Image: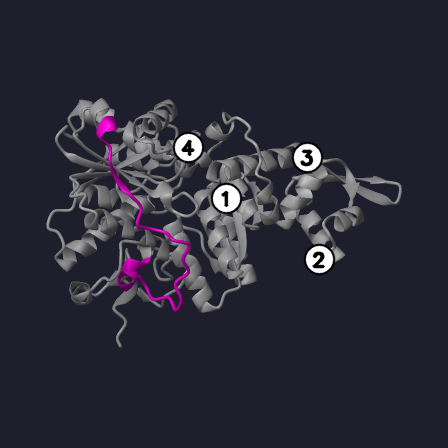
Amino acid sequence: METPYQLRCSRCGAKAEPTPWNRCLRCGGLLEYVFNPEYLRDVQLKGSINFWRYRPLLPRVDRAISLGEGGTPLHRAERLGEALGLRGLMLKDETRNPTNSFKDRPGALLISDAYSRGFDAIVCATNGNQGASLAAYSAKVDIECHLLIPRDVDMGKLAQMIAYDAYIDEQCSSIEEAIRLSVEMAERHGWYQATAELNPLTIEALKTISYELHEQGAEADVVVAAMGSGATIHSLWKGYGEMKAMGWMEDPPRLIGVQAEGCPPITEAFRLGLEKPMEVEEASTGATPIRVASPIYGELALKAIRESGGLAVSISDDEMLEMEKTIARLEGVFAEPASAATVASLKTLLDSGEIDGDERVVCLIASSGLKTDDILRGLRMRRRHPSLTSRLTTKERILRLLEEGETYGYELWKRLGRGMTLGAVYQHISYLEARGLIASRLKGKRRYLRLTEKGRKALRALEELRDLLS
C-alpha cells in the first residue's frame, strides 16, 4: 500500500525519508509531513475522542504507547466570559493530560516512534513540560531518557522528571544552548532526537488539538494560543488546513498568538510586518515555556497567523499571574502563567476591537499551574501519605535517607535493603552529586555524603506534587 504522506521541506519542497530530524539537507528549511488530499478525503475515524482516534492522520508507528492522552475537556467559561465581556468564551483544558500538559500529545507520538524504530535512548532539550512528558512515556517502555534543561526550569516540572527517573543535565543557560547540545548528543551517541523543536512529529501530534476542537463542537471564530517556538500556532493551522481539505469545514478560525512582553520575537515581527522573528538579545520573563529568544517555528507561526487573518500580541508577566488566579477562581481550571496569557490577552483585544464580545473564542490552556515555581512556593505543607514511599525511585530514596543526616555509600546500600548491587548505588550517588543534589567530603578513609539545599528543594517539590495529585 502506498504511503499516504511524504516528509517535505516547507521551504524548497525537497522530499526526505521519515526521520526524527526536521532539517532539510538541501536548504536547511524545516521538514514537515504532508498528507495526500485524496487520502484525507477518504479517512474514517473510529472510537471516542482521544489522541489515538486520529492515528489515520498521523505518520505510522508500529505500536501506540499511551498513558491516556488527548480527549481533553472543552469548558464553556460562562463566569469568566461574563467578567471579560465575552459571551462565547471556551477553555481547551490540556491540563487534564497524564502529566498535566499538552506536551503529552507529542510525548506519546515521539516515544511510540522511538520504540517502533528500536531506539533504547532518547535526548531532549526542554523548558520543562516536554521533558516531564517524555520522561513518563519513556519510563512506561523502559527507554533511557536524557533531558537537557536550562538551570532555572520550574521546580514542579523538574520534580516530575526526577520522579520518572530521567537523566537530567541542567547546566545550560538557555533553551537555545540546550537545543544545540541535544543535536551534538544525538549525533554522538546515536540517541533518538525528541526535542520538540527538532522532530517533525511534534507538529503532527499538536495538530490533533484542532481536530478535537472541531469534533467537540467549538465552532470557534478565534483560537488563542501562547507562543514560544511558534510550533503550537503552526500546528493548529495545519490541523485546520487538513480538515478543510477533508471537507470538514469551510472557514477555519482566526489564530491569535500571545507572547510575554519580555520575550516577543514573533509578536514584534508581526507588528513590523516582517516574515521572520525579531532577534531578542536577552529574554526576560518568568513564563519559562514561552521564553524562547530564537523561535525555530517563528517564520511558520507568522505565516499561520497571517493566513488565518489573526494577529500576535504580547502581555506582561503581572497580567499572566493575575489571570492565573482569576481563571482558577471563576472556572476551576488551574493554568500556569504562560497558559493564562491566552485569557489575559482578551481584555486588550476586546478594548481594541480586534475581537467582538459576541464571537466564539477558544483559549488553549496548555499546562497546569501546579507545575510552576510561583505556585509551589505559596503552597502549605500537607500531611504525607505513607503509602507513597513504596513508589519512590532509588534516587529519591537516597535523597530522603540523606535528609536524615550525613552518611557514606556502603551504609546507604545497607539501608536501601541491598536490593541492588553496591556498584549500582554508587552510580546513583555519582548522578545526584554531578547534578548538585548531594555533596561529599573526605573524612578519614571514607567519603561522607550530605544533602544540598538544591536537593532539599527537589524533595519539597516532589512532596508537593504528590500531595496535589493524590
Q: In this rendering, is residue 241 above or below 448?
A: below
The front one of 218 and 155 is 218
Q: Earlier in the sequence, mark 3 or mark 1?
A: 1
On residue 55, which mark appears? none
Q: Could you tell me which residue is drawn at 53 percent across and 64 percent down?
A: 120
For the N terminus, the quadrant is bottom left
Q: Residues within 10 Å of mark 2 (few under 14, many from 20)?
A: few
Element at label 1: helix
- Percent across and percent down for residue 176 are 46, 43
| Residue 64 falls within the magenta-colored stretch | yes
Question: Looking at this rendering, what residue extends furthest in the left direction?
Answer: 250
Element at label 2: loop
The front one of 137 and 152 is 137
Badge 1 amino acid: Glu
Residue at image mark 4: 287
Q: Residues within 10 Å of mark 4 (few under 14, many from 20)?
A: many
- Percent across and percent down for residue 226 are 32, 37
Residue at image mark 2: 420
Badge 3 amino acid: Thr
Q: Residues within 10 Å of mark 3 (few under 14, many from 20)?
A: some
Left-right relation of 152 to 352: right
Q: Residue 294 appears in which quarter of the rendering?
A: top left
Q: Earlier in the sequence, mark 3 or mark 2?
A: 2
| Residue 62 falls within the magenta-colored stretch | yes
Left-right relation of 86 to 136: left
Residue at image mark 1: 177
Task: Measure how far apart labels 4 and 3 are at the Cα level.
Answer: 26 Å
Magenta residues, start to end: 52-80
Of circles 1 and 4, the one toward us is 4
Element at label 4: loop
